[in-house]
Image: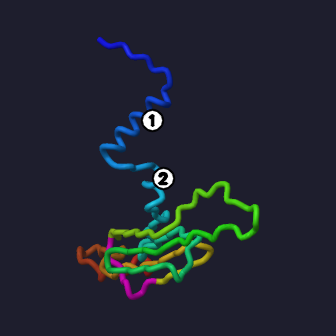
Amino acid sequence: MIIRRYLDPITEINAIRRQINDVFGDLTSEALTKADWAPAIRLVDRGNDFVLTIHLVGVTAADLDVQVTADSVSIGGIRQAPAAPAEEGTQVLYDDTRYGSFQRLVNLPDAVQNDSVEANFTDGVLTLTLPKVVEARNKVVKISLGGTASPAIEAGEA
């Protein structure tokens, strides 16, 4: 049995990190987190439609690409890094904001009418109202006492 003394734990941790980097390449946490980011989203089912909210602070409408199919929404774009401070003697001390391109794909639980989507982009928040196809909406069926069903009507009209 060999007894080894650890005089400086930081030195030992750095040695292990160097060995891992030799095997897997130089993957630092900054390289992993700065390379890709995704905006926060929220999907709400309101019965007859879905409301998808995407938080895109710092992204302009010109830098967005939104595509809607019957069963998914694709949001892509780029958040530009601000220019360096122009004033002499001014420097950025801390910036935790992620910059660069992003891509999100949201699969929808029901089909939507992609030609009737309403979009609102205000204060860095994109809100998409995605109406469901008529077959996917909640239906209310009135049952008569004779055992025959009345025609189905939409939930909002009952």
Residue 123 is at least partly visible in this image:
yes
Q: Position of residue 134 (x, y in %)?
A: 34, 82
- Most common SS among magenta residues: loop
Q: Where is residue 101 in the image (x, y as percent from the top left)?
A: 46, 70
Q: Label 2: which residue?
A: 30
Is disc 1 surrounded by few (<14), some (14 to 19) or many (20+) residues within 10 Å? few
Q: Residue at x 49, y 73 (%)?
A: 78
Q: Label 1: which residue?
A: 14
Range of the magenta residues?
110-117
Q: Position of residue 122 (x, y in %)?
A: 60, 77
Tell me the tag on residue 114: none
Tell which residue pokes out farthest to the left in this image.
147
Q: Which of marks 1 and 2 is in front?
A: 1
1 and 149: which is toward the camera: 1
- As shown in the figure, which amino acid type bears the numbered disc 2? Glu
Lateral position of residue 19 relative to residue 118, left or right = left
Residue 141 is at least partly visible in this image:
no
Q: Quadrant of residue 57?
A: bottom right
Counting residues from the N terminus, which is met first, the one under dot 1 or under dot 2? 1
Quadrant location, the C terminus: bottom left
Q: Quick check: 52 above or below 131? A: above
152 and 51: which is toward the camera: 51
Lateral position of residue 125 relative to residue 26, left or right = right
- As shown in the figure, which amino acid type bears the numbered disc 1? Asn
Quadrant location, the N terminus: top left
Q: Quadrant of residue 81?
A: bottom right
Q: Position of residue 28 (x, y in %)?
A: 44, 49
Is 28 within the magenta? Answer: no
